[in-house]
Image (cartoon, helix red, strand yellow):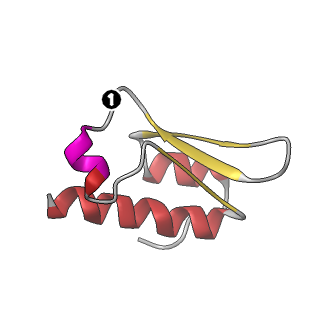
Amino acid sequence: MSTPVILEDLQAAFPGWCIWRSSAGRIWATRNGRRLSQRELDHGLSQTIDADDIAQLAEQLKEQEAGEQAL
């Protein structure tokens, strides 16, 4: 998958997440519809993540997906 360039692309690529830009300009994502278990949190998954830009957030979201698959 190529790196999404706009928020709508990022949202389409990661439908399990709610993605938005804060008033401070950071990009945030939080999981839709489920809370992580303590086991998932202990293995490095996050309920909510943030980044300076869309490309950084896309990388974090890819890492979260890889972590989920590893469990």
Q: Position of residue 60 (x, y in %)?
A: 48, 64
User: Which residue, given by chain and number where applicable, does mark 1 sit on?
Assistant: 34
Which residue is situated farthest in the left direction here?
71
Q: Amino acid at mark 1?
A: Arg
Q: Residue at x 36, y 26 (%)?
A: 33
Q: Residue at x 25, y 41 (%)?
A: 38
Tell me the chief SS of the magenta region. Answer: helix
- The answer to which quarter of the image holds residue 64 is bottom left
Q: Nearer the viewer, residue 56 or 49?
A: 49
Q: Quadrant of the N terminus?
A: bottom left
Q: Is residue 38 magenta?
A: yes
Q: Is residue 46 magenta?
A: no
Q: Residue at x 48, y 47 (%)?
A: 12
Q: Position of residue 19 (x, y in %)?
A: 58, 42
Q: Position of residue 36 (x, y in %)?
A: 30, 38
Q: Vertically, is 26 above or below 3?
A: above
Q: Position of residue 32 (x, y in %)?
A: 42, 31
Q: Vertically, is 42 above or below 62?
A: above
Q: For the residue carrying disc 1, how many other residues have a C-alpha within 10 Å: few (<14), some (14-19), or many (20+)?
A: few
Which residue is situated farthest in the bottom direction here?
2
Residue span colored magenta: 37-41
Q: Residue at x 14, y 57 (%)?
A: 71
